Amino acid sequence: SVDIPKVGKNPPRGGGAPFPGSSGSPALLQGKVLDLDEDEDDLEVFSKDASLMDMNSFSPMMPTSPLSMINQIKFEDEPDLKDLFITVDEPESHVTIIETFITYRIITKTSRGEFDSSEFEVRRHYQDFLWLKGKLEEAHPTLIIPPLPEKFIVKGMVERFNDDFIETRRKALQKFLNRIADHPTLTFNEDFKVFLTAQAWELSSHKKQGPGLLSRMGQTVRAVASSMRGVKNRPEEFMEMSNFIEIFSQKINLIDKISQRIYKEEREYLDEMKEYGPIYILWSASEEDLVDTLNDVASCIDKCYKATEKRMSGLSEALLPVVHEYVLYSEMLMGVMKRRDQIQAELDSKVEALTYKKADIDLLTEEIGKLEDKVECANNALKADWERWKQNMQNDIKSAFADMAEENIHYYEQCLATWESFLTSQTDLHLEEASEDKP
C-alpha cells in the first residue's frame, strides 16, 4: 500500500483495507449493443453511464472546513482488520405487467459499533446501486468511486436474463460493494450504511429525503456556468494527473478492444474445433488402413479443444474483467477531474469579481474564503485517493497479466504434449509395421 502522510484526526477505526485483488465480471465484447432497458427504473441491464449525477454538477454538501474534510480523507498507514463483509447472491426475477427486473440478496456481516446488528439481509435491484453511486459522488465529489457494470450489453453475446448474464452482473455488483467497504472513507458513508441495512420501504423513504428538484437544478446551473469559464491556473500536479488519465484511458481502451476481439475470434475457433474432431472419426469408418491414425488425430483435437475451452474460461474470468473495469475507472477519473476543476473555476470567478469589484467586497471576501477551503479539501481528497488508486491499479494489472501468461504457458504445453504424443505413437506404429514386413 502507498504511504500517505497522516493529517487531521483519526477517522473511525476499521474499514481501512486496500482494494481487493483483481476479480470481477467478465468484460463483454465490443460490437453492436442492444439496450434491454424497456423500463428505465428497474430492468437489469448494463449502462455505460451509471451515474445519477450530471458530471458537471458539484454538491454544496461538501464540507467547507478544511479540517473536517481532511478528517474524512485521512488514510491509515496500518489498515485494521476487516470488519465489514458483504455478499451478493440469490438473484431473483420479478415479472409484472409493465416491467421485468432482477433483485439480488445482499448479506452484510459486521462488528462495527455504529450498526444496530451484526448481520443484515436486504434485497436490491440495479437502480438502487445507481442511487448509491450517485450519493457517493454527491458526498465525495473528488474521491474515486468504484464503477458499476454497464447498462448496455452486446447483441448476440448473451440472451436476456440468462444465467451467464445474471452471474456476471452478480459478481460485478458484489465487487462494487466490496470496493466501497474496503475504502477508508467511503465505507463510513451514511447512505452506504442505509443501502446495506434498510428494508425496501425504508430505503424508498430515505431516497425521498434528498435535495429538492429546484435545489438540484440550481446546483447544476451554477456548476455548468463555472465549467464554461474553465480553469485558468490548474496546479502542475493536477496537470500531470490529467495527462496520465488521458494516456491511460487511450491505452486501456485499446487493450480492452483488442482483447475482446481476440476473445471473440478464439470463441469462433473453439466452435470450429468442436466440429473438427468428429469428422476424423467419421472418416475412419471408410479408411480401414487409417483407422488408428485418424482416431488419434480426433483424440488430439478433442484434448486441444478442452484445453482451449479452459483457457478461454480463465481469460473471461481473470483478464477481461480487470481490463474492462479499468476502462470504466478511466471514465470515472475524468469525471472526478472535471468536478475538481469546477470547484476551482468557481473560486477563480469570485477572485476575478473581487479584482474588478463587480460585487459587494465583504460578501465576495467571505465567499472566496469558503471556496478556498473547498478547493483545498477537494485537492487533498483527490491527491490521497489518487495515489491509493494508482497503486492498486498497478497491482491488479500486473496480477492479471501474470495470470494470463501462466494460463498461456500451461495451455501451449498441454497442446504441445498432445501432438508430441501423437507423433510418438505414429513413429512406434511405423516401426511396428516395418518389422512385420521384414521376411
Image: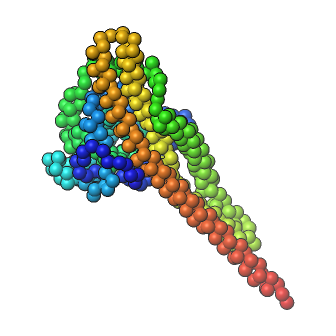
Identity of the residue drawn at 27% across and 47% down? 106
Question: What is the count of numbered marks?
Answer: 0
Residue 227 higher or lower than 70, as above or below: above
Q: Front-most of 225 and 90?
A: 225
Where is residue 42? Give x, y as percent.
33, 33
Q: Front-most of 250 and 77?
A: 77
Where is residue 124? Give x, y as percent.
28, 40
Looking at the rendered image, the quarter that the N terminus falls into is bottom left
Could you tell whether 108 is left or right of 157 in the image?
left
Looking at this view, name the residue that lies furthest to the right. 439
Where is residue 180? Give x, y as percent.
33, 45
The image quadrant that residue 71 belongs to is top left
Identity of the residue drawn at 60% across and 48% down? 262
Looking at this view, name the residue that lies furthest to the left. 116
Identity of the residue drawn at 24% across and 47% down? 10
Q: Front-most of 104 and 358?
A: 358
Could you tell whether 3 is left or right of 97 in the image?
right
Does residue 231 appear in this view?
Answer: yes
Residue 84 higher or lower than 348, as above or below: below
Looking at the rendered image, the quarter that the C terminus falls into is bottom right
Looking at this view, name the residue that lies furthest to the bottom. 439
Residue 202 higher or lower than 109, as above or below: above
Does residue 35 appear in this view?
Answer: no
The image quadrant that residue 222 belongs to is top left
Identity of the residue drawn at 20% across and 32% down? 206
Where is residue 418? Give x, y as percent.
64, 69
Colour scheme employed for the rendering of this structure:
rainbow
Could you tell whether 283 is left or right of 158 in the image?
right
